[in-house]
Image (tube, rainbow, N blue to C red):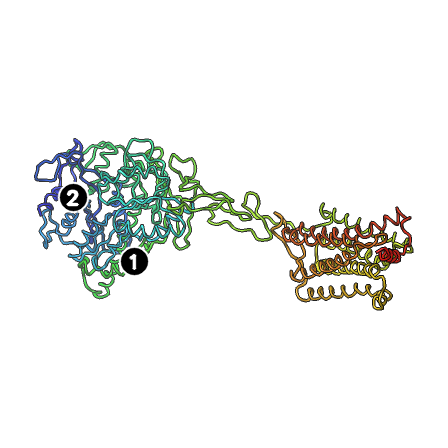
Amino acid sequence: MLLILTFGLLYIPDFVVAFTDNDCYVIIKDGFSREGDVTVGAFFPLHTFTTSKNMPVLKETQYYQDIFTEYKLKNYRFVLALVFAIEEVNRNPHLLPNTTLGFDLYNGTPYEMSILIPPIFWLTGMTQPLFNYNCAKKRMSPAALTGTSMTVSAQIGRLLQLYKVPQLTFGPFDPVLNDPDQFKFLYQMAPKDTSLPLAMVSLMLHFNWPWVGVILPDDHRGTLFLSGLREAMESKDICIAFLKMIPGTWNSFSSAVWKNLVNIQESSANVIVIYGDVASLQGLMRHILQLLVTWKVWILNSQWDVDNNHDYFMLDSFHGSLTISHHHKEMVDFTKFVQTVNPYKYPEDIYLPKFWYLFFKCSFSEVDCQLLENCQLNASLELLPRHLFDTTMSEEGYIIYNAVYAVAYSLHEMNLQQVEIQPNARREGMGFSPWEFLPFLKNTLLNNHVRGHMVMDGRKNLDSQYDILNFWDFPKGLGLNVKVGTFSLGAQQLSLSEQMIQWPTRFAETPQSVCSESCRLGFRKAAQEGKAACCFDCIPCAENEISNETDMDQCVKCPESHYANLEKNHCLQKSVSFLAFDDPLGMALTITALCFSVLTAVVLAVFVKHRDTPIVKANNRALSYTLLLTLIVCFLSSLLFIGQPNTASCILQETAFGILFTVALSTVLAKAITVVIAFRVTAPARMVRWLMVSRAPNFIIPVCTLIELVLCGIWLLTSPPFIDQDAHAEHGHIILLCNKGSAVAFHSVLGYLCFLALGSYTMAFLSRNLPDTFNEAKFLSFSMQVFFCVWVTFLPVYHSTKGKVMVAMEVFSILASSSALLGLIFVPKCYIILLRPDKNSCVDIRHNIHSKRKSRLKFS
């Protein structure tokens, strides 16, 4: 009780404080009133008592000698909003007819030990209160307006609840005050901050700020906001660079917690979110201003009053900051009303004379401190600088305006009900108790009958739209909060006018706030171990992968039909390629094939021309013609592999290759068997004689060819060759080629050819020592060796190459093996026919061999 009384001294009317030599300026009353049939109690923080020296007047008290009064000119707009709303209601003939609204205004002290003194004065009407006694004149007081601190509203709410007086708060929404079990008669008029984290994150996304610091009050509001902010940031891959929880005491600027502020200044995060209000974090604001932190962008909520500080620096720490405020419509009439406010119009106002004395050099009258003399003409609050006083309606003022209309509509409904119940009753005025008024107030708030259309849902206030404000304070003292955009909750849409935004003076363009520089196109992000997701390294994309956006987590692989450019930021269409005739390699192979085919035709012509000579007749003329014709077609069949492939050419490539070489090799085999039969048999038996007469070796060709036809038929029926694409053989190209279809069938055909070559080689090898005048066994043996080596070498080389080279390798093998047959079998014969005709004579080699054997037997 002693503490209450000692703090109550501060509220004794006409209490003098030491601030200036003028007594009228330092004399401040408890409050003032406006008469009305119904009065509303209002508790606004309008002035405080502070000290600069710790010099107590008495040791047993907590007071100091240098106490002085500090007027909150910014908060005076609360009073103007209250007066404006009440006057507007009283002028409305359709709302509360024959009833006027008034108010009882008290200064709301921020000191916890003296918070309840003003409402006690209001409830009891006594400067020395006696509880449960009301010495005030009879009045109707339906409700009380309180704010802006949650602590003030909660303590006053518990007191008013004892008297069942409804309470409307205009301070920031607090979930604690929304508990109906603790505060049955308290209603918060301010919207919730539920969507504030989404609005802030939308700003971060718009300006690409993934690295953000956060400073919050260390209380339940800060914890609740942090939960919503962290969830919204994580969903958009935005990281918290640092988190500081500040003790929510009014003088926290002197706390040791500010030793850590150096870390905040040096942080790589250029954007910092500050959530709170002046009552809880005013020390933070003062300290930031003192340090001149002009290289950070501050994102603030609407409860911050960034321009309520006076210093003489040209730079301002909060210049360029962004404030997110609940949207409310502009009140042009309020601005006009403020222009007309002066001490003469409202003589009961105890604050206006002091403001006129301070700003307009008026002098107080010796008769009364409420009277002024020697004032400049046309003095008005609109002449004050914006950093001192803003004539537009603030967010809190708009809430007060809505609260007054909530009371007015509720009174109107109650008055109508009383008239319906007692239509003929004569009453001099409204008579009711506060608890009788409560149901009508609930109904008004529930049905949203407030003039300003504050969105309400019982005790659940909703927020729908935010205004984005940019603080301009350069040069120092400009103090403008300029609306630069909006955020709509329903559409989740942010609308900004970036050309209007002024950034802190350290930034010539839109600031960046990143932990790591963005990964440019062609690179992807790689997380740094032990650090936040926003801290990463940039790694080039892998082969044939691209990143066409900055800061991509993974590179995108180009489709098979495309390839990555050198910068790896775009997929280019691959050009279709194949072993074309105009390609240098294709052209060389084509010319080679044509030359060999022409050369084979020339050899055939030579053999035909000299068909009756011994050397042609001795080596089975028909088989020679067959082999030469087959070789001509073999050379020409290699052209099927050159040019753009199609289904027909793919099938013909492999079948023609297999069948033609089968014919060629079976012809060689037949020639080798013919040589063996002709030179090995000196006394031919009946069967051997029959073989020679019937020319049975000639049947080798159709039999071997038939086997090959069967293999090719099975190949075509089971898995025929088809057109395929190779997108990896050459960079930037898609190679069109023929797929063999069944690899088993292809290797079976190739194995069968090698088997024929091996059989021909064996037969030729058996006749290698026979007389070689017209004997071609040695040449058949050499040609089969070359043929066999070519195709055995072909297999590993073929499977190790890709694209056009693989096709060219097959063409080369065909030409090489065919030319081996042509060169090693027919070139020696052409040499004898054309250059050594003397050797082209008929000699009975078998008779000579038989005579030699007889001679050796005689001598032996």
Q: Going by the image, does 494 lie left or right of 333?
A: right
Could you say which is closer to the camera, residue 179 or residue 454? Answer: 179
Kindly give the residue lying farthest to the bottom in the view shown. Answer: 686
Q: What residue is shown at x 25% (from left), y 34% (from top)?
A: 359
Q: Please tell me whether mark 1 or mark 2 is closer to you in this view.
A: 1
Q: Residues within 10 Å of mark 2 (few under 14, many from 20)?
A: some
In what element is the residue under mark 2? loop
What's the amino acid at mark 2?
Answer: Asp
How far from the left and from the top, in percent, is residue 160? 17, 54
Q: Quadrant of residue 94?
A: bottom left
Q: Between 307 and 227, which is closer to the camera in this rendering? A: 227
Q: Position of residue 386 (x, y in %)?
A: 32, 38
User: Can residue 755 be seen at all in this image of the molecule?
Assistant: yes
What x and y, as percent, mark residue 302?
32, 46
Q: Residues within 10 Å of mark 1 (few under 14, many from 20)?
A: some
Query: Is residue 845 visible to us here?
Result: no
In this view, the residue in front, 430 or 829, is 829
First in sequence: mark 1 or mark 2?
Answer: 2
The numbered dot on residue 460 is: 1
Looking at the picture, tell me which residue is in the foreground, 753 or 784: 784
Amino acid carrying mark 1 in the image: Lys
What is the spatial separation of the Cα atoms under label 1 and label 2, in whole angstroms? 34 Å
Contact? badges 1 and 2 (CB < 8 Å): no
Position of the C terminus, as image quadrant, is bottom right
Please, is residue 753 above or below residue 41 in the view?
A: below
Q: Which residue is mark 2?
A: 30
Count of marks, rendered view: 2
